[in-house]
Image (tube, rainbow, N blue to C red):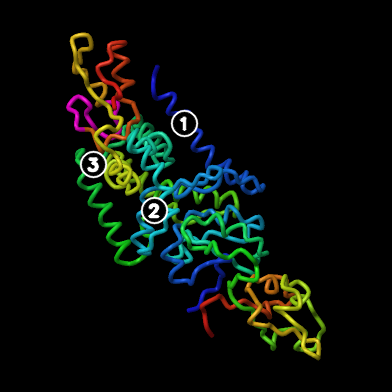
Amino acid sequence: MSRDFLRPPGAVPEEDFLGRCIRCGKCALACPYRAIRVAGLLDGLTMMGTPVIRARLSPCYLCLKCVPVCPSGALDGQVKKREQVRMGTARINKKECLTWQGTFCRSCYDHCPLFNEAITMDNELRPVVNEKKCVGCGICEHVCPAGTAAITIMPAGETG
Amino acid sequence: MRITPIRRIVQLLSLSAMVVVPLLNRRGIAAVSGSFYSLNIGPVLLTDPLIAIQSLLATLRFEAVLLASALIPAGIALALGRVFCSWVCPQNTLSELFDTVGSKLGFVRFFTLGSKPLIRYAVLAAILAATLFFGFPLASLFSAPGIISVQTARLIYEGTVGLELTLIAIIILAELFLVRRVWCNHLCPVGSMLGLCQGKKTLKVVLSEAESRPCIRCRECAKACQLGLNPMIGQLVPQCHNCGACIDACRKISGASKPLSFHF
């Protein structure tokens, strides 16, 4: 089963993350947008106390204030620029996407912090994700006006 | 000067800090930030020694900054004993409160476990061995002060708390109905690790009898100890966490002669 949440920016790969994170909650305290939430027991015993981001609810705005406060190395202090972040990759569900279905919308394209790099428009003005540039912040998922987000983030390290 | 009133002030400050720090952090004032797992005071990083050792065992990686940040807390335990437990830890404050109320209401604890540290170190060893075996930071899930502080912050940030608080409820119920102060006295791995940091010169409660300061064997000190220790027969370390309740009780009887007092 793949994760339905993201880790904060700079997070080491998931298996390593679960071992390193000491559940101290500092990253959540540092997040000015309160996007980083603390997972509870209901999220699973191994998840308990770890930081999670649910982008549809509240995405990461890439301020990177959480990275330097992590004492355990679970968030890699080498990540200093937003271009270095790899929280996941956006994917467009073309069957749900308004533009791909013929109604013009450019919410994801307009709100992407890596403007015109991570999400570009093809020659019929439909959004396309550039997987090499996308950092997985989830702002596109957050702003998507479709009932169920037509653009979602596949968390880093997950497939399918 | 009685010790307990000063300790109560420190306990209250510690409880307030758990609320004030997240409130300030939320407004972007983050000079002090963190929890009882790991705390930043300005540029100084303080980490629970148990949590630092746990990270070493779980990841088998030498995180120099994390390990170094446990040195100040470990040093405080080396100098002053387990004062974190008795003066700062919110679980101890809660347990003390419930024990006082429980005793007043005449709650009966059905078992006693004596005052040997054997169980304490067996539990610590089991948790650390499991941490190493599974490569998982298990000790974090057993840090009562960590859980209480993170969940307080979570309540302030998210308006919700987690089921982790079940552990705290279980501790309080077990202490009220099964064994008096069983968590702090026999089980808590945080306190056990701090106990291991103590040495020969660590501050401790000592009965030093002399003609000028006779002990009249009134047993007030033993009665005052919630952990069930008896300062008159010594051998309090490592179970004693230097709360000073016995010394206060002694001075009530002995006045200025002070047969019982803190000594390095």
Q: Identify residue for label 2.
A: B52
Mark found first going from the N terminus, 3 or 1: 1
Mark 1 secondary-structure assignment: helix
Host chain of mark 2:
B
In the rendered structure, the answer to whether residue B132 lies left or right of residue B207 reads right
Indicate which disc residue B10 carries: 1
Instruction: From the image, state whether disc 3 or disc 2 is nearer to you.
Output: 2
Q: Foreground residue, B218 or B7?
A: B7
Instruction: From the image, state whether disc 1 or disc 2 is nearer to you.
Output: 2
Q: CA distance from mark 3 to mark 1?
A: 32 Å
Host chain of mark 3:
B
Host chain of mark 1:
B
- Residue B36 percent across, percent down from the top left: 45, 46
Mark found first going from the N terminus, 3 or 2: 2
Indicate which disc residue A56 carries: none
Q: Identify residue for label 3.
A: B110
